[in-house]
Image (cartoon, rainbow, N blue to C red):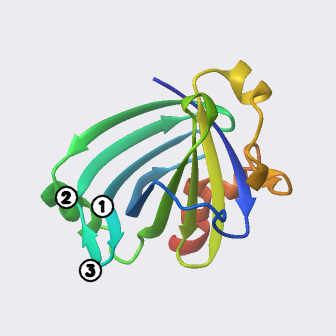
């Protein structure tokens, strides 16, 4: 399956209320220049008048090949026990994100994530490269810096830079 996605550095969340929120924990098994294999666990967060509730965690193994706008992606669901077994073999190397989704026009979604409590990025996944280049961006991204083709902002490279001892 092809993943067609643009990314931007952003200062935080848009002013609008997000539709969905999740906490995500990711650990990389392979993080090379042209391929990545990662295990991740995501869990829905619902903030209500009586406090915060958490959904049932969902876990996956994802393989991505390529860089930039268009990459090959294959994802397989795994159990939470399998995720923890994998993660525990690579201790203290997880990336933690708070992910927020905002619906956009044409069925697209703006996803804004806070990474490790320190920096933010936004992304939009598109059904085609043509739409990725022609779709109007939300106002929130007007002054954002696009990082789609900047390898230093790829999550696998962030993981290598911040988690792998040199």
Q: SS of the residue at dot 3?
A: loop
Lower sequence index among marks 2 and 1 = 1
Instruction: Work out whether 18 lies above or below 92.
Output: above
Q: Position of residue 117 (x, y in %)?
A: 55, 78
Residue at the (25%, 52%) spot, across then down: 58
Whether the residues at callouts 2 and 1 have beta carbons within 8 Å, the answer is: yes
Res 120 quadrant in image: bottom right
For the residues labelled 2 and 1, the Cα–Cα distance comes to: 6 Å
Observer-nearest residue: 154 or 119? 119
| Closer to viewer: mark 3 or mark 1 | 3
For the residues labelled 3 and 2, the Cα–Cα distance comes to: 19 Å
Lower sequence index among marks 3 and 1 = 1
Q: Is residue 12 left or right of residue 114?
A: right
Residue 161 has which mark?
Answer: none
Q: Which residue is mark 1?
A: 43
Residue at the (54%, 62%) spot, across then down: 17
Q: Which residue is mark 3?
A: 50
Q: Position of residue 134 (x, y in %)?
A: 79, 25
Q: SS of the residue at dot 1?
A: strand
Name the residue furthest front. Answer: 49
Res 26 quadrant in image: bottom left
Q: Which residue is mark 2?
A: 56
Observer-nearest residue: 160 or 120? 120
Name the residue furthest right. Answer: 143
């Amino acid at each position: 399956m092809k993943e067609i996605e643009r990314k931007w550095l952003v200062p935080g969340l848009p002013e609008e209320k997000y539709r969905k929120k999740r906490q995500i924990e990711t650990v990389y098994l392979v993080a090379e220049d042209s391929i990545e294999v990662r295990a991740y666990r995501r869990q829905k967060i619902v903030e209500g008048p009586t406090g915060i509730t958490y959904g049932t965690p969902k876990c996956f193994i994802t393989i991505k090949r390529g860089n930039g706008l268009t990459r090959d992606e294959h994802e397989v669901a795994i159990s939470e026990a399998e995720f923890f077994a994998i993660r525990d073999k690579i201790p203290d190397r997880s990336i933690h994100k708070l992910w927020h989704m905002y619906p956009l026009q044409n069925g697209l979604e703006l996803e804004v994530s806070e990474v490790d409590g320190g920096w933010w990025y936004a992304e939009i996944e598109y059904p085609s490269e043509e739409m990725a280049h022609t779709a109007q961006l939300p106002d929130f991204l007007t002054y954002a810096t696009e990082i789609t083709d900047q390898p230093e902002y790829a999550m696998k490279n962030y993981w290598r830079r911040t988690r792998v001892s040199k």
